[in-house]
Amino acid sequence: MRDASVSTPPPSLRDGPPPQDELGEDLTIADLDTLDLSAFDALVVSPGVPLNTHPLAARARAAGVPIVGDIELFSQARADLPPHKVVGITGTNGKSTTTALVHHLLATAGMPARMGGNIGLPILAQQPLAQGGVYVLELSSYQIDLTRSLDCDVAVLLNVTPDHLDRYDGFDAYAASKARLFAMQSPAHDAVIGIGDAPSAAIARGLSARGEHLTKIAPGVCMDQSRWPSLQGPHNAQNALAAIAAARALGVDEAVIDRGLETFAGLPHRMERVATLDGVTYVDDSKATNPESAAPALAAFPRIHWILGGRAKGDDLDACLPHLGHVAHAYTIGEAGARFAEVLRDHVAVTEAGTLDAAVRAAAAAAVRGEVVLLSPAAASFDQFRDYEHRGAAFRAAVEGLK
């Protein structure tokens, strides 16, 4: 396949001597501003490229050139791989944990598996599985937008709540992107859908003809999560139910599923317990970058000192308000600190801490044995940190500084 990259060579490469590959041969680097895209079979782009605004994407569409990503390349290569199955997992929140959990359940069952997509190594960077293996893919809406032919043996949709709306023509278009995972799927393959929100429930209704091949995960199902230390809170109950349904569809034994749920270690920065000091537990949920993903963390513990703030994705914390009865005190940080404090002040005691280190020290001074200091920011990290991982590492360092 002839493909084009969206990367534009820097002036030093365009204006200097011809660049060379590792064999010393001259390379030709195209000028993407003038490149004739009609000569290409496809434009292969990173999911981070905004298809709605990037000029190269507009030119590709005008030329009738398909715009695809690495997941589509994997899909097209499947016929040449040893017989295998694919699990695709999407949703606004919870998809990384659910993907890792499905992979862990398969590993516990002794089934060869690879995990990729929007988590870990790109799937094309990994060695192919032997016959009978399972590829477990976390799929963002951006990746689904770049995929045309991925027929998942098990497709999972956890939820659809407002996010990434700068990339879509409204919320309905974002939900439609998620629904495409099932449109690409053979009707005889298995679909697992959480129906706790209206868009997801509507997608499930549209698949009702699948009968036994459709599993609906209803909200509020009571489960004994006491034996699953890394799967606490109502959101993780839903994640676990989806993973259980996927594992069952792949033939994993119930006893193995139970053992896998008990031994799952969780993912960094997602409800990760980093320390317990003087009876106070410190939990890093830095990955919670919107109110909808922070709300379940607030529901998971009875007495919380909540650290939140950063670069807000909206002006409200509406999704979190029903759980403020669990919050003993809130500590706001970053650009959204003042706004979030204003929203919360009529409901809970609030300190505008400003920085994460100051918030940790203030929370540690106020918390008592049995309580939780929770970093669940409900906002992006880019005002004060490189990314949510950097923010989570800073939280851990601040906690370690208390010892």
Image: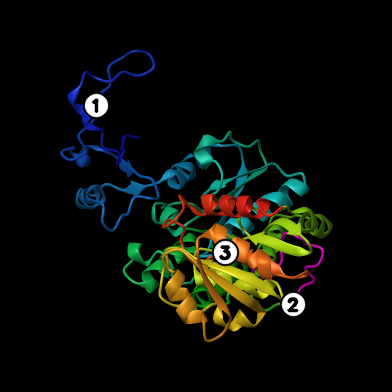
Q: Which residue is mark 3?
A: 359
Q: Which residue is mark 1?
A: 13
Query: Is 231 covered by the magenta stretch?
Result: yes
Above or below: residue 337 compared with residue 392: below
The x, y position of residue 343, in whole percent, is 47, 81
The dot on residue 60 is none
Q: Which residue is mark 2?
A: 222
Q: Are marks 1 and 3 in contact (CB under 8 Å)?
A: no
First of labels 2, 1 by sequence position: 1
First of labels 3, 2 by sequence position: 2
Q: Residue furthest bottom?
A: 346
Q: Residue at x 52, y 82 (%)?
A: 345
- On screen, residue 8 versus residue 308, left or right, reads left
Circle 1 sits in a helix, a strand or a loop, which is it?
Answer: helix
The three-letter code of the residue at mark 3 reads Ala
Q: How many marks?
A: 3
Above or below: residue 166 compared with residue 138: below
- On screen, residue 377 versus residue 220, left or right, reads left
Which residues fall within the magenta stretch?
A: 222-235
| Residue in the foreground of this view, choosing between 377 and 401 | 401
The three-letter code of the residue at mark 2 reads Cys
Circle 3 sits in a helix, a strand or a loop, which is it?
Answer: helix
Q: Give the CA separation, mark 2 to mark 1.
A: 60 Å
First of labels 1, 3 by sequence position: 1
Camera-nearest label, 3 or 2: 3
Q: Are marks 3 and 2 in contact (CB under 8 Å)?
A: no
Q: Residue at x 21, y 31 (%)?
A: 11
The three-letter code of the residue at mark 1 reads Leu
Q: Are marks 2 and 1 in contact (CB under 8 Å)?
A: no
